[in-house]
Image (spheres, helix red, strand yellow):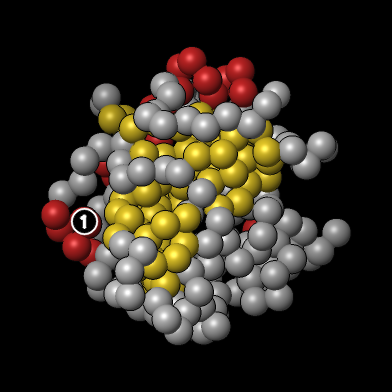
Amino acid sequence: MEAKNINPAVQIENDFESHGFAVINTPILSKEIIDSFNNMPRDQHSLSRRRHIRLSQYFIYWEEGSWVLALLPQRKYVQSAKHIRLAEAGGVKRHRDQLEIDPTLIVAKIMDSLTLAKSGQYQANVNQIRVVCDHEFKGVTVPEGPHRDGHEFSVIAVVKRHNVSGGVTQVIDPKSNKIVLETTLQENQAILIDDERYIHYATDITPQTDHTGYRDIWVVEINKWENRSYGPTHEKKASQCL
């Protein structure tokens, strides 16, 4: 498959099941949610970059016509050392302050777009991230480089792009190492990726002027509950590099 640029969004029904990725439109968020990106703590595990982050983890199920997000007790965030080879991240237990807002609107849209069975039970990590670029800090959006997250589905949703260029999302075939999709996600767009099939990456952002720039995103990682990336069993497994 040749690399292709996609803007505006391609509908999930026509693309995801056949290709394993799709770009979708996401709901317009409230001012409260958008403004909450201004109140996020600095990522203390990534001080060489200027990144601000929060994370909440949820048990998700369908009841009476809608997706329900039940907040799970706070635990350290652990990414798989098998897939994330960055020393500061792979297999490392990292603290994340929890979200201050309710992400149900965006997560429900993602769940619907993936057409996941409503009889199922799921777990999601909802990461709220701001990457900043200025004269002092490079806008490194993906310090891991091209990678898998180690989940069933990975989703990147853009909330705001302020005074930045770059941040180009790439979906890559790991067998051929060819880029099968390259696109600059705009505000209120998201890309859904079959994380078991592809690796992904996003280029650095740079400020368009002498002033600070930033890119606000959600990174949502979804698994069936039995394959959840939460709890002591996951943490033990994720710390092992096979």
**Viewed as shown, does residue 37 lie left or right of 22?**
left
- As displayed, is residue 114 above or below residue 77? above
Vertical position of residue 8 compared to residue 79: above or below:
above
Q: Position of residue 158 (x, y in %)?
A: 37, 49
* Image height of 219 relative to 107, above or below: below
User: Residue 232, image x and y in percent?
Assistant: 62, 64
Q: Could you tell me which quadrant the C terminus lies in?
A: bottom right
Q: Is residue 167 above or below residue 78?
A: above
Residue placed under numbered mark 1 in the picture: 33
Viewer-side residue, 12 vs 160: 160
Q: Residue at x 63, y 47 (%)?
A: 200
Residue reaching furthest to the front: 209
Locate the N terminus and report the quarter of the image it occupies: top right
Q: Check disc 1: other Cα within 10 Å, few if <14, some if 14-19, many if 20+.
A: some
Give SS at disc 1. helix
Q: Amino acid at mark 1?
A: Ile
